[in-house]
């Protein structure tokens, strides 16, 4: 029998057992599958670069999980159910085989947790840095995908979970912010994609908070041709973020890496949102409202003053 070329041996060693039936054992250049009857495909892609989206000394197992989870968060923002994924690795020299074994373990853990499998992908070499790209596929009932352009004046601004833990986790890892129990660093390394919320017919629009609460809320406002205001005192904080102190407020609102959902919910759907959130075990908080009488996003402090920030969030370019 002809021996496998190094690239295919690498794939077989670390990734073949992650493939489901549609992935054809990763022995072909494409996957073959049918989406569930009556459902529409939802497709998204994100890339992570060493030193930009994760720290080079982060555990490779958490890097694998984070790569999958940030993409799952995009599905959650559209109300979709995970189906499968493809991943592309651009690998610099010097990473040992056990690094990829741990990276694949992170993918394996979350495949089981979130109910999907590897469909395929590609590997290539690079002089650096390590670049990891993932394309996620999901499905949603026909016509039910949530968009960014549906917010209306009078809708409440709602968020899931807590805001600011991801960026404060990075501060803990790089800037010495106190993090006694490691919970902030854990949130930076392991986002919690908010899958499982039945948002069809409940939310008018949604986005996940990846680049900063104020910036991502601004995306909803721009696409929906409306404005919004929030009350900074209502933005939910974890115990660890609250302990960091009020001087971290601007960082919490603009730092990103939360991967919580930001929702536009009309008043008559608020009880439905609370019910589906309780069923999914996900906390939700109303922090403001969309308002056709204003432009952009206004962040109001308890004293009635508007918080002016240096920049609303992260820019990729």
Image (spheres, rainbow, N blue to C red):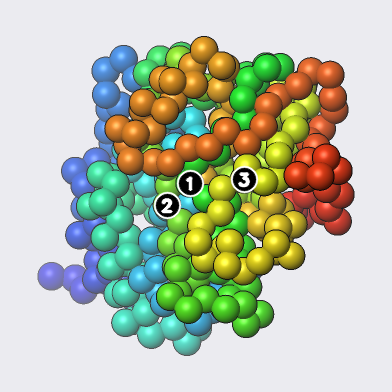
The residue that appears at 52% across and 76% down in the rendered structure is 179
Q: Mark 1 points at which residue?
A: 161
Front-most of 155 and 92? Answer: 155
Asked if residue 128 shows in the view, the reply is no
Crowding at mark 2 (Cα within 10 Å: few <14, some 14-19, many 20+): some
Question: Mark 1 touching mark 2, by CB under 8 A?
Answer: yes
Q: Name the residue under label 2.
A: 192
Identify the mark at residue 203; answer none if there is no mark.
none
Task: Give the mark nearer the N terminus: 3 vs 1.
Answer: 1
Foreground label between 1 and 2? 1
Front-most of 210 and 286? Answer: 286
Vertical order, 125 against 221 (above or below): below
Q: Distance between the residues labelled 1 and 2?
A: 9 Å
Q: Name the residue under label 3.
A: 235
Q: Position of residue 286 (x, y in %)?
A: 57, 33
Q: Position of residue 72 (x, y in %)?
A: 42, 45
* Outermost residue, left side: 1
The residue that appears at 39% across and 41% down in the rendered structure is 282
Image position of 267 (left or right of 215)? left
**Disc 1, SS:** loop
Image position of 222 (left or right of 78)? right
The residue that appears at 47% across and 87% down in the rendered structure is 94
Question: Mark 3 touching mark 1, by CB under 8 A?
Answer: no
**Disc 2, SS:** loop
Q: Position of residue 9 (x, y in %)?
A: 27, 71
């Amino acid at each position: 029998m002809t021996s496998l070329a190094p690239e295919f041996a690498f794939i077989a060693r670390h990734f073949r057992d992650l493939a489901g039936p549609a992935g054809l054992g990763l022995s072909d250049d494409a996957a073959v599958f049918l989406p569930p009857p009556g459902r529409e495909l939802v497709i998204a892609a994100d890339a992570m670069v060493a030193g930009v989206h994760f720290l080079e000394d982060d555990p490779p197992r958490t890097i694998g999980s984070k790569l999958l989870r940030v993409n799952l968060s995009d599905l959650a923002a559209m109300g979709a159910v995970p189906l499968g994924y493809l991943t592309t690795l651009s690998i610099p020299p010097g990473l040992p085989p056990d690094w990829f074994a741990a990276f694949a373990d992170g993918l394996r853990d979350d495949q089981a947790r979130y109910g999907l499998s590897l469909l395929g992908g590609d590997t290539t070499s690079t002089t650096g840095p390590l670049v990891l790209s993932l394309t996620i596929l999901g499905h949603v009932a026909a016509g039910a995908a949530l968009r960014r352009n549906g917010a209306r004046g009078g809708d409440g601004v709602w968020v899931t979970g807590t805001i600011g833990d991801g960026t404060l986790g990075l501060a803990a890892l790089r800037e010495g912010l106190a993090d006694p129990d490691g919970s902030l660093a854990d949130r930076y390394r392991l986002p919690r994609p908010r899958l499982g919320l039945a948002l069809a017919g409940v939310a008018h629009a949604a986005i996940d908070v990846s680049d900063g609460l104020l910036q991502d809320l601004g995306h909803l406002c721009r696409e929906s041709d409306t404005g919004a205001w929030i009350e900074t005192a209502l933005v939910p904080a974890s115990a660890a973020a609250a302990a960091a102190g009020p001087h971290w407020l601007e960082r919490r609102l603009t730092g990103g890496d939360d991967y919580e959902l930001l929702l536009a919910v009309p008043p008559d759907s608020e009880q439905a949102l609370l019910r589906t959130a309780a069923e999914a075990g996900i906390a939700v908080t109303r922090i403001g409202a969309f308002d056709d009488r204003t432009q952009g996003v206004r962040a109001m402090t308890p004293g009635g003053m508007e918080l002016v920030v240096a920049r609303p969030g992260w820019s990729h370019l």
